[in-house]
Amino acid sequence: MPLSKDDKRKLIYAIVFSVASYAVAAGLALGTAAYALSIFTDPVVTLTVPLIIVAIGIQAINAKNGPLLILIISAILYAISGLIFLVPTFVIAGLVVEGVSRIVGYRSFKAVMINTTLAGGLVGVFSVVFGVLFVPSTASQFALDLMLAFTGIYFVESAIMGVVSYYLGNFLIKSGVLH
């Protein structure tokens, strides 16, 4: 069955925003070497511009399965690059954000804040948890008190990125750059 014009648009947006987010995250991770400092610092760096890109992508798609599609494509990109521990991270975050977005929506301020905070916070927390499980050398850096502190940091940072995402996405949609 061929895809409708709207389904093609959604798929193209999902691919473009996923690849853009992945590329920026890779550049930030390599440029800052945050993972070398601590397993907790890498998500702090990568939950900035890459998260904004994903959040704007969800606003642009503005439909069921949009968050899930973006995060599954992201999981595939990370799997291809050998970062297997990030695959369950993105799948879990994608499923949660997809479920919540069906209740709160995709483009309102409240929806963008909730979706972005959940996506970023969950990706931050689970990337550390799965990083410890999949990459044994990081287990020595893991401490529960640090995990609790950084969990708060991940969710607060993601909420701030949600505000930025809402205003950027809203501008791009109202100006006609995105539909």
Image (cartoon, rainbow, N blue to C red):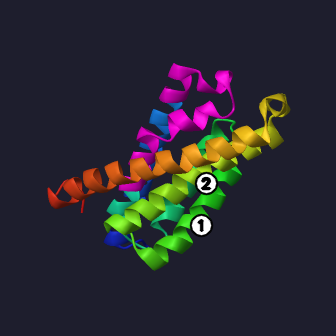
Residue nearest the observer in this picture, 78 or 127 = 127
Q: Secondary structure at mark 1?
A: helix
Give the x, y percent position of residue 28.
Answer: 49, 28
Residue nearest the observer in this picture, 178 or 164 = 164
Residue 84 visible somewhere in the drawing = no
Residue identified by numbered label 1? 96
User: What's under tag 2, amino acid-wise?
Assistant: Leu
Give the x, y percent position of residue 70.
Answer: 49, 56
Which mark is first along the chain, 2 or 1? 1
Q: Is residue 111 left or right of residue 118?
A: left
Point 50% across, 41% down: residue: 47
Is residue 8 inside the magenta stretch? no
Image quadrant of residue 44?
top right
Point 68% across, 27% down: residue: 38
Is residue 41 inside the magenta stretch? yes
Q: Is residue 35 left or right of residue 106?
A: right
- The label on residue 8 is none
Instruction: Tell me how far mark 1 sits from mark 2, CA to CA.
Output: 9 Å
Residue identified by numbered label 2? 122
Q: Are marks 1 and 2 in contact (CB under 8 Å)?
A: yes
- Above or below, 2 against 10 in this view is below
Q: Which residues are magenta?
A: 27-56
Residue nearest the observer in this picture, 111 or 76 = 111
Disc 2 crowd, CA 10 A, few/some/many (<14, 14-19, 20+): many
Point 49% across, 63% down: residue: 67
